[in-house]
Image: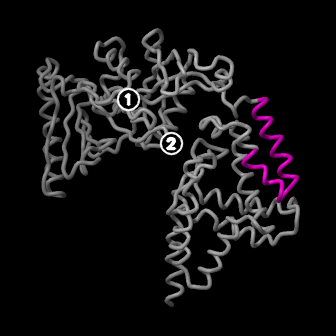
Amino acid sequence: MSESLQDQIQFLIEIDKLKTIERRTRIIHGDRRENDAEHSWHLAMMALVLQSHANKEVDILKVIKMLLIHDLVEIDAGDTFAYDTTGYADKFDREIKAAHRLFGMLPKEQAEEMHNLWLEFESKETNEAQFASALDRLQPLIHNYQNEGDTWLKYNVTSDQVINRNREMADASDTLWTNTDELVIFIEGEEGALMGYIMELRKLVGSRPLIMAGSCVLVFNEEGHLLLQRRTDSLDWGTLGGSLEPGESLEEAAARELYEEAGLRAETYKLITVFSGQDMYYKYPHGDEVYNVTAVYEAKGIKGNPVVMDDEGLELRYFDLGQPVPEINPFTELPQIQLKKGAFHLTQDFYCEEVLSGKTEVEIVMETDNVLAYHHTRPYYEHHIVVIPKIHIQSFISEDEANNDELVVEVMRVIRKIAADMVERTGASKIVTNLGSYQDSKHLHWHVISGGRVT
């Protein structure tokens, strides 16, 4: 293989990273955010389809090249939100550095061509660059129109901001700009999504207290630990959740927030309680006051592993409710106190209610008529297997265990086999069960583990 071909292939491998760079815009036919590779492909298709609407004659192949190249720099520089004025302060410096590195991977002639095309796109001086830039601005507008102003609402973007940012589209295409302007006005006037319901109310009442309806979602792992989010704005730990959007049900809000904040989906949402009253008063750092009315849901049959999905959260972590949570949000402390008091019932037996019922699918390691062993659905160790009896026994020292000696012996035989196999494969194993206040899920269960801790 020649050196130039090796360089070209390495470049192609490197730019595959573009598929991992997420934008703020949500895809039209789904609930996830668009990535840069999808965005670039969509723009190339738009150039082919919409070229007849350019004000001036353009070299459409050159336009497509620019659109395929223009966001490659975000592999290093990251995506900068269009309305993030702080991020734009050093955007070009970050991107020019990325351009030197990425295009420099190619043979000299190709490197110069791509670097010059990228600079031409950024300068917006040629007909091709102006038309490519207009399409780059049109595409997220179409997405927001189809998604009822989703990104604009989430980041409090006003119609004036949208129109002022995109007005230069008219230089490349009067037709596209005229119709875009109508779309923005329609969303603001008919859907109420652009400015946002809350922002419209604030125009009328200022910072005085509003009654805000919303949902919070309680997610528990197999150990009964609660999933919390460390928020970007307050830097404290709180439950997942947020305010109701116009036309949305409380359960729909719970499902949306669970996905937007943690990338999780659930099979069912069980309404636990509703919090309201003086305890739910909050004053934001900027002065806005609210009285929250919050529906508390328990999400059951969780699909996937938690991952930070948006700019509202810094970190996601499961916490033991029996231990103090550092820097806890006051609205999370309230349900935590109620949980400790037993004021409402949550899942106490994950194994009966989720695993043995079939609601949560597991990867079975070994099974007898009376015992099930499976890979932990969210392992804490490199090798982590759970062993449970198929009937309800509360714990290793409970009264019902004393009346099921034969079953416990069968459980021990399965544990011995699992542990022996693990020692043979990994060189070591540990067998653990929890009792008393250490036992969150009230069903006898044993952990057979080996290897390092999984963070």
Locate residue 455 relative to residue 312 in the image: left or right: left
Residue 80 pos. (x, y %): 57, 53
Residue at mark 2: 310
| Residue highlighted by disc 1 | 357
Q: Nearer the viewer, mark 1 or mark 2?
A: 2
Q: What element carries label 1?
A: loop
Above or below for 437 versus 277: below
CA gap, disc 1 to disc 2? 33 Å
228 relative position to 323: left or right: right
Q: Is the magenta stretch mostly helix, strand or loop?
A: helix
User: Would you call the spot at circle 2 few (<14 residues within 10 Å), some (14-19), or many (20 or more)?
Assistant: some
Q: Is residue 142 magenta?
A: no
Q: Residue at x 43, y 24 (%)?
A: 298
Amino acid carrying label 1: it is: Ser
Residue 193 lies, with reference to residue 104, above or below; the image says: above
The residue under the point 48% across, 31% down is 267
Per the rendered image, the range of residues in magenta is: 164-190
Q: Position of residue 360 (x, y in %)?
A: 39, 35
Determine if the magenta segment contains residue 187. Answer: yes
Residue 238 rendering spot, x and y as whole percentages: 39, 29
Residue farthest along the bottom direction in this orientation: 2
Residue occupying image coordinates x 48% and y 11%: 276
Query: Residue 453 in the image: x percent, y percent?
Result: 23, 48
Q: Vertically, is 182 above or below 100? A: above
Direction from residue 427 to residue 132 in the image, left or right: right
Element class at badge 2: loop
1 or 2: tag closer to the N-terminus: 2
Taking the image as shown, residue 447 lies to the left or right of residue 66, namely left
- The numbered dot on residue 261 is none
**Residue at 86% from the left image edge and 47% from the top image edge:** 178
Amino acid at dot 2: Asp
